[in-house]
Amino acid sequence: MYNALIVALVIVCILMILFVIMQPSKSNAASTLTGGGDDGSVKQKARGFEAFLIKATTILGILFFVITLALAFLSAK
């Protein structure tokens, strides 16, 4: 059981890294911090592949924490 959770954790970690890297960058974030450029008040909802990446990253993050807690529980025994 412990080894299966370790393998699952490694797979989740690799997938999470790939999904985060594939997400488009927010190029105007630095200009909003300095007060220049667009005011950023108009937010567009993510659609298509970007929405899929956001949902998949969220699910992988939740799986990461659940598997990590399960491993901590098993190693404490």
Image: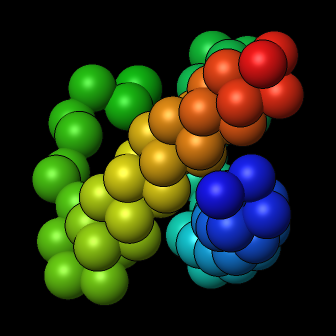
- Residue at 23% over, 40% down: 43
Residue at image position (16%, 53%) is 45
- Whether residue 42 appears in this view of the structure is yes
Q: Is residue 48 left or right of residue 6?
A: left
What is the total number of numbered labels drawn onto the structure image?
0
Residue 26 horizontal side relative to residue 38, left or right: right
Residue 38 position within the rendered picture, expressed as x and y whole percent measured from the top left: 45, 36
**Residue 21 makes an appearance in the image:** no
Residue at the front extreme, as displayed: 77
Residue drawn at x 18%, y 71% as measured from the top left: 47
| Residue 50 left/right relative to 13 | left
Front residue of this view, candidates 76 and 61: 76
> Whole-percent x and y of residue 67?
59, 43
The one nearer the camera, 65 or 33, is 65
**Image quadrant for the C terminus?**
top right
For image coordinates 65% across by 58% down, the residue present is 1
Percent of width and height locating residue 17: 74, 66
